[in-house]
Image: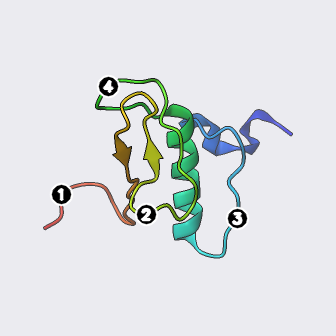
Amino acid sequence: MGQDDNPGRQFGFAEPAVVFKGPTRTARSAAEAWVALHGFCPNCAADRLPQLPNNSPVADFRCDACGEEYELKAKRGKLGRST
């Protein structure tokens, strides 16, 4: 396997994406994994945001330092201003 076998690596995704039936679930899984590895708390600047168990009401991540909870949202489509 060559270095270019996983193009997602350039964005910080360490492993190949898991394949789900729908693109929305695949994107959500990749985004959650990225935040768990690279996210930080905007409230207190803690280095990590641990992921909460699946199906937790409202929140996806909770800061261990300050207790602030965050929900990850994603939108399909191009970035930019909507008109």
Tell me which residue sits at (57%, 60%) in the image: 54
**Label 4 vs 3, first from the N-terminus:** 3
Horizontal side of residue 9 vs 56, given as left or right? right
Tell me which residue sits at (46%, 24%) in the image: 47
Horizontal side of residue 73 vs 60, given as left or right? left
Residue 58 lies, in percent from the top left, at 38, 61
- Cα gap from disc 4 to disc 3, whole angstroms: 35 Å
Q: Which mark is residue 36?
A: none
Q: Secondary structure at mark 1?
A: loop
Q: Secondary structure at mark 2?
A: loop
Q: Which mark is residue 19?
A: 3
Q: Would you place residue 80 above or below residue 68 in this image?
A: below
For the residues bearing labels 3 and 2, Cβ distance under 8 angstroms: no
Q: Amino acid at mark 3?
A: Val
Look at mark 1 in the image and give the residue it sits on. 81
Which is closer to the viewer, label 4 or label 3? 4
**Label 2 vs 1, first from the N-terminus:** 2
Q: Would you place residue 45 above or below residue 80 in this image?
A: above
- Cα gap from disc 3 to disc 2, whole angstroms: 25 Å
Horizontal side of residue 70 vs 55, given as left or right? left
Q: Which mark is residue 57?
A: 2
- Cα gap from disc 4 to disc 1, whole angstroms: 30 Å
Residues packed near mark 2 inside 10 Å, few (<14), some (14 to 19) or many (20 plus): few
**Label 3 vs 1, first from the N-terminus:** 3
Q: Would you place residue 42 above or below residue 34 in this image?
A: above
